[in-house]
Image: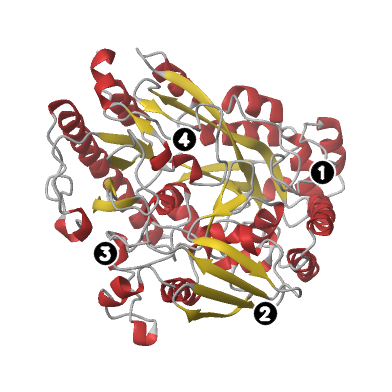
Amino acid sequence: MYFKKRNAVARRTTIVIVVVIVLMAAAATYYWTMSGTSPTASSSTPSSSSSSSSSSSSTSTQGQAMLSITWANVPVTDPAKGSDEASSAALVNLYDTLVFPTPSGELKPDLATSWSISQDGLTYTFHLRSGVTFHSGDTLTARDVVFSMNRLLTIGQGYAYLFTPYIANVSAPDQSTVVFSLKKPFGPFLSALVRLYVLDANQVIAHEASGTYGPNGDYGSTWLLTNDAGSGPYTILSANLESNMVLKEFTNYWNGTQPNQPPLVQFIGTTDPSTVHALFASHSIQITDQWQEYSNVVALSQLKGAKLVTIPTVNEMYLMMNTRKPPTDDIFVREAMFYALNYTAIVTQVFPGSEYSAGPVPKALPGHNPNIPVSQQNLTLAKQLIQKSKYYGQLSNYPVTYYWVTQVPAEQKMALQFASDMAQIGIKVNVVGEPWLTVVADLANVTSSPNVVSIEDGASYFEAGSVLQSRYTSAAEGTWEQNEWLHNSTLDAMIAQALSTQNTTQRFKMYYGIQEQIFSMYPTIYAFDVTEVRAYYPSVVNWYAANGNPNPLLGYDFFFRDIQFYPQALASLG
């Protein structure tokens, strides 16, 4: 306990330092933008120990303006490790994938120009695009694709869970052909490949340090914290892991550059309301993060030239209940809590613009079961259910611990609403605010996991199976995506069977049954389907997601090559 407290104090101290650094960086950004000068690796990275300048970005950036956005954290840009919102957005821009998702969920060729699938669904053959060069100048070949998949599987973090159960072997018969051999069919395999980011094998190998991956050492992980080995439309110019990261357009991108795409993009890792307000009001950022309280976003949107925008997603806010810890190990307690919550208050007052959820899968995701009822309060039923619990009459001896993530201030309001509602059925709730890293650490063990934690999660690819796999299988236990600790072999088998089904109609039917099974277990309170609410300057940023054309997969609303940036319009904002 003492160790944990010391860590929390250290993190709070770090946050204060980060806010100061961010303000300094933002002020410098505004100066660069308005004066026509530009950042250098040294000026944008206060600590040389945690920063780096990409070798492919050594050319001058004088006169180039910078699109700046706040995020919950600085991206983790190692493709074998990053998977959160900021990291996914950075990876989409730094790296290419074999296929690329469209807003409708369809896939279009990217690095792969064509592919074929064997009749048994176990062999996928891809033919690669010619003339693609990495940021280093190396030519992309099939060997790099093989290396990238093997590296992802070996490190086993980030989006590796999508492929680990299925990949038997990856081979390159020639420089332009890649063959994936599967252990068993994986129906959504093509869709999942939007998360296989292809690295420059030569660059990674050249920067391997000592580590735990045998002859591969650290597999280049240390170097990839502040550098990239991609072929995407942007490359890392500089990175300070405590405050910000700057990406620079890659002018030799195989698909060309777009008119008015931002030459520089800055990720600023803070959601502190006062900091975000100061940055946006001074025009030092042009798009806010999605984690601000609604009232703060409304206030920002009323500034001259600003606008409030709501963007639909395929994410859901889950109140994950620990089914192994009293009193939430009792299904009647969980079911009573599910019906005691005032969802209307949350949707209309705490997270305005969001939508009512209907079970384990966001409603907008293909494969969602439309027969699952929408979450709604039924206090009479909740009081009846709690009386069936084995803890009834002694609930005061079993207070419920509820974690909310401190980087998202609105979650505290939801936590307090939860506590108030649970009091009506005799459940005492201890509301605890914890920083994200503490939440992740505590969820790694069933005993340190709280009774309830509020976490937004969503699809890695455009299908219900993605959420079911990452949220409700035993493999997800010990990660931030599952506090339920289900460890249910029957459910594991049902999900595995569905994912192995090649026929989409049959697979979706299986998804329906799985959602009904999960819903009947009441392991989760489905708070709401997430709609992002942000403030931005439309005259400065012509952003497709804000114009009614979002690409709802995590990160893909920020494919910067398709965003037009007009920094000269900043002057008219005053």
- Numbered label attached to residue 183: 2
Return the residue at label 1: 386
- Residue at coordinates 35% horizontally, 76% vertically from top-left? 219
Name the residue type under label 4.
Answer: Trp
Asked whether residue 393 appears in the rendered view, the answer is no
Return the residue at label 4: 291
Labels 1 and 3 touching (C-beta < 8 A): no
Name the residue type under label 2.
Answer: Lys
Task: Assess disc 2: are there few (<14), some (14-19) or many (≥20) residues with their C-alpha within 10 Å of its C-alpha.
Answer: some
Q: Nearer the viewer, residue 491 or 186?
A: 186
**Mark toward the viewer: 3 or 2:** 3
Q: Find residue 450 and report its horizontal and vertical position in percent.
A: 58, 53
**Mark toward the viewer: 3 or 4:** 3
Labels 3 and 2 touching (C-beta < 8 A): no
Asked whether residue 531 appears in the rendered view, the answer is yes
Q: Find residue 210 and report its horizontal and vertical position in percent.
A: 28, 81
**Which secondary structure, mark 3?**
loop
Q: Is residue 216 above or below residue 288?
A: below
Return the residue at label 3: 137
Q: CA distance from mark 1 to mark 3?
A: 65 Å
